[in-house]
Image (cartoon, grey):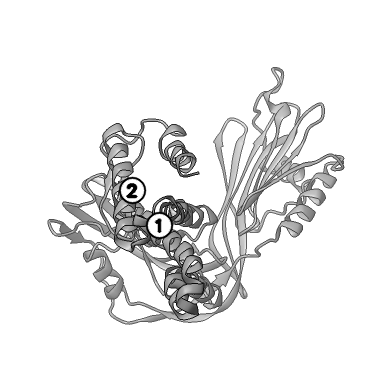
């Protein structure tokens, strides 16, 4: 069993991936935990917990393999040597990234496994109290994980993915500004998107295809955590990617790839008449523009109507058979939740000085930052709330960029 387990670990850590990470290292502790927290996706949490539980069998099997490993030091030491060997080989071969978090998670898994087997092996000899001590690593992980997830789901707003995992190095930065920042906190509204369940999304797509007189009886549905993919395959396939969080979607009629179908220019009135058939209404004062041949876009920038905020765009492609075959609908109506107090411009600027923002350059450092404009904008959090953020527009080392700082 132990030999089979080791083969499985080697297969997972080496044989199912290419040599794409030459010399990559991440020595920052708890990076994977911060990333999982701020993004709060199932994929990130799965990856983190799988790294822990992958080594649980190691801690279970070694004490069964030889009595020597019933001493904690031997099992933990072997686990440390095994995971260090894996990370080192990944670093040298490029088949993975040398990560401190992986060392920690693997070692934690081995400790949990050791505690489980020793708890069962000593329960008769040493009693319940000693067994609970052995089970304590597992119980601690369960309690901490449960507390973390409970806290997240009970708090009002979700996490923002714009929060950085690493700080940007600003120690050598020369900063210039064209604006004057105030030091007064302000009151601004928070909005929420009309989030969809999978059932509600299915109903929307069925109604959408129904407007086109398409039979949805054999419709294929592929559901992911954050979106659903819907296919109708007949003489001309139709496809919708529907995002549960905000109700935005992308539609495509694949007959647009036929040789006789070409993009065609038209006027706004004809386009509106066509997209009305899809149940889409264009809001007043939306900015209309032609992007390319047959490609048109309506844009609304943060328009407040009573207790709602309208923002986003609608992109359509029109073809020479006088039909719309592609729609990218990201024109979202947000409902006001309540007014909240946010940071002052100076407080947000201090976070810029401290490097508390996402920056994707390899150096992770900025030498020259010029800020041309600062405004309060909005970003969608992971619970569907449209949270206020400070947007610092300018250039970093001569390249245009926008720095986003959470307002809450």
The answer to whether residue 378 shows anywhere in this view is: no
Q: In this view, does 309 lie above or below 360?
A: below
The C terminus - image quarter? bottom left
User: Where is residue 329 shown, x and y percent of the image?
Assistant: 63, 49
Q: Which residue is drawn at 42% across and 61% down?
A: 114
Mark 2 touching mark 1, by CB under 8 A?
yes
- Residue 246 left/right relative to 53: right
* Residue 272 as seen in the image, left or right of residue 380: right
Residue 187 marker: none
Name the residue nearer the viewer: 209 or 167: 167
* Residue 73 percent across, percent down from the top left: 29, 61
Query: Does residue 261 appear to the left or right of 130 in the view shown?
Result: right
In terms of secondary structure, where does tag 1 sit?
A: helix
Number of residues whose C-alpha sits closer than 10 Å to that of mark 2, classed few (under 14), some (14–19) or many (20 or more):
some
Q: Name the residue under label 1.
A: 110
In percent of width and height, residue 377 lies at 44, 65
Circle 1 residues within 10 Å: few <14, some 14–19, many ≥20: many
Q: Which of 124 and 26 is in front in this view?
A: 124
The residue singled out by tag 2 in the image is 83
Q: Position of residue 367 (x, y in %)?
A: 16, 51
Looking at the image, residue 274 lies above or below residue 348: above
Instruction: Residue at 38%, 56% (x, y): give it.
Output: 67
Who's the residue at 43% across and 77% down the image? 130
Mark 2 or mark 1: which comes first in sequence? 2
């Amino acid at each position: 069993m132990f030999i089979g387990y080791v083969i499985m670990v080697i297969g997972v850590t080496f044989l199912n991936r290419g040599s794409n990470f030459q010399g990559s290292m991440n020595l920052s502790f708890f990076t994977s935990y911060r990333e999982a927290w701020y993004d709060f996706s199932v994929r990130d949490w799965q990856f983190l917990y799988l790294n822990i539980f992958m080594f649980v069998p190691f801690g279970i099997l070694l004490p069964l393999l030889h009595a020597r490993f019933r001493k904690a030091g031997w099992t933990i030491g072997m686990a440390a040597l095994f995971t260090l060997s894996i990370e080192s080989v990944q670093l040298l071969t490029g088949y993975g990234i040398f990560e401190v978090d992986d060392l920690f998670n693997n070692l934690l898994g081995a400790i949990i496994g050791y505690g489980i087997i020793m708890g069962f092996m000593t329960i008769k000899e040493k009693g319940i109290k000693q067994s609970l001590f052995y089970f304590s690593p597992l119980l601690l992980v369960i309690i901490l994980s449960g507390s973390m997830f409970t806290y997240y789901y009970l708090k009002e707003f979700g996490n923002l993915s714009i929060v950085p995992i690493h700080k940007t190095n600003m120690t050598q930065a020369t900063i210039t500004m064209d604006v004057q920042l105030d030091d007064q906190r302000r009151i601004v509204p928070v909005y929420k998107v009309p989030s969809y369940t999978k059932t509600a999304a299915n109903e929307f797509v069925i109604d959408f295809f129904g407007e086109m007189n398409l039979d949805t009886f054999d419709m294929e549905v592929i559901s992911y955590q954050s979106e659903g993919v819907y296919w109708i395959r007949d003489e001309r396939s139709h496809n919708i990617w529907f995002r549960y969080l905000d109700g935005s979607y992308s539609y495509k009629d694949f007959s647009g790839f036929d040789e006789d179908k070409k993009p065609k220019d038209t006027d706004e009135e004809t386009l509106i008449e066509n997209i009305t058939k899809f149940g889409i209404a264009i809001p007043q004062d939306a900015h209309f523009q032609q992007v390319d041949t047959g490609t048109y876009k309506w844009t609304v920038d943060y328009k407040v109507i009573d207790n709602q905020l309208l923002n986003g765009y609608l992109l359509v492609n029109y073809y020479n058979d006088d039909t719309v075959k592609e729609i990218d609908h990201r024109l979202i109506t947000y409902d006001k939740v309540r007014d909240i107090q946010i940071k002052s411009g100076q407080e947000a600027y201090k976070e810029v000085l401290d490097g508390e923002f996402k920056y994707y350059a390899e150096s992770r450092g900025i030498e020259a930052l010029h800020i041309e404009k600062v405004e309060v904008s909005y970003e969608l959090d992971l619970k569907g709330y449209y949270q206020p953020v400070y947007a610092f527009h300018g250039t970093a080392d001569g390249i245009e960029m926008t720095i986003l700082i959470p307002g809450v």
